[in-house]
Amino acid sequence: MSDKEFSLIEMAKEVKSASKIIAKCSSAKKNNILNAMASALENNTQMLISENKKDLEYARTKGISKSMMDRLTLNEKRVKEMADALREVASFNDPVGEISEMKIRPNGIRVGKMTIPLGVIGIIYEARPNVTSDAAGLCIKAGNAVILRGGSEAFNSNMAIVKILQKALEDEGLPKGCVTFVPSPERSIMTELLKLDEYIDLIIPRGGESLIRFVAENSRIPVIKHYKGVCHIFVDKTADEKIAMDLLADGKLSRPGVCNALETMLVHKDIAASFLPKAGKYLSENNVEIRGCSETLKFIPSAKIASEDDYAAEFLDLIIAVRVVNGFDEAVDHIQKYASDHTEVIVTNDYNSSQRFISEINSSVVLVNASSRFSDGGQLGLGAEIGISTTKLHAYGPMGIESLTTKKFVVFGEGQTRHGYDVKL
């Protein structure tokens, strides 16, 4: 066994031990920790920005894309947002210890379910230093310890954030093992981490499709994942064109490199002649490359002809695939064929169409006349977000505190036995 393997196992043991301590903390104690962490981040803003600059310089030498650079960057606003997210998580109800679904059986026993922590969560992620604090905060609120393994592109930022969070933990009398960062970006270390099923209860990967597939294929530990976000907007024939344009702009232009950005637009044939020339002009003026079907090119001559692969693509860039559909059913069929079960939007003024859309489309987030960018834990009221699940098992969609817990059965009786024993003393 190499020194690296040994040190990783020792780290995992330390986190496992810490998980038993954080699991017993009261809600008040966990909230104090989260608020202390938030203040500590704000008090160290300039240090964090300084460390982040090292990562940005490294990223530039590696030729990382503009969208990835955006996700990597820390500034005063983003540090404050990280701190505010921790405070918001602290303000939420603590699900741990709640007993629900209490039922009385015919024999008089009372059966319920108690919410408990999962234990040790492993988070494997790329770029986005805010994931470090978000994941730590959600895990602590749910009574879990966390092992964080970030990518090389954000190594300095992540190390600095974790040191700040660990100091806040120790100041509150908790072991720093409650929040631990793997101090090596090597792929071999990640592979070993994925084998530690004795110490880690769940792995959540966040990043590109190749990373998530690698984790899913190499892990002995259960994995919650989503491979990509091929998010659609369907402009129905009754759509308000102003609303459709606003949702298109927000979904494609605000941050094209995130997983809830729009990648494909479907337009009903009855509104195409009116809507598509305006949409094409707006998108082109904002440097969006349009790849459309033959019908699309009739209304947007500057568009490129779309390939089959374009409709399955997560561009994460200023590119959008467009298709004119003959009706509602064809739009649904297209989404069901190409969707990644992430996020879908319909723009319509027809109540029946909206109800059919939310009934027939089973992606993890379905929106009516609202931006795909609301498919986010914070925007959906979860506070911070630990990840998005499109696997349907255990959790589906953006994951908050409750997704980091499970339930155990608890039974209350008054001496009942299953087989009628009544021992005389």
Image: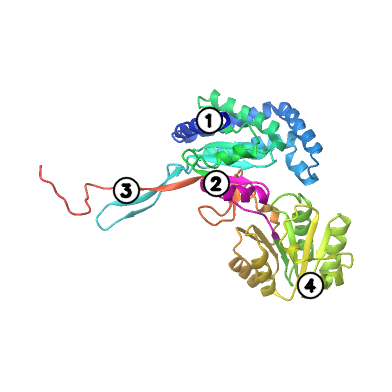
Quadrant in the rendering for residue 238: bottom right
Residue drawn at x 58%, y 67% is 359
Q: Of callouts 4 and 1, which one flags the residue occurring earlier in the amino acid sequence? A: 1
Circle 3 residues within 10 Å: few <14, some 14–19, many ≥20: few
Estimate the x, y position of residue 243 in percent, counting from the top left: 76, 61
Which element carries disc 2, helix, strand or loop?
loop
Task: Using residue 18 as the reference point, say whether residue 180 is left or right of it.
Answer: right
Quadrant in the rendering for residue 37: top right
3 or 1: mark nearer the eye: 1
Which residue is disc 3 drawn over? 411
Residue drawn at x 67%, y 51% is 209
The one of 122 and 219 positioned closer to us in this rendering: 219
Circle 2 residues within 10 Å: few <14, some 14–19, many ≥20: some
Which element carries disc 4, helix, strand or loop?
helix
The one of 67 and 279 positioned closer to us in this rendering: 67
Examine the rendered structure and indicate whether residue 122 appears above or below residue 360.
above
Q: Label 1 sits on what residue type?
A: Phe
Which residue is disc 4 drawn over? 271
Q: Label 4 sits on what residue type?
A: Ile
User: What label does residue 219 carry, if any?
Assistant: 2
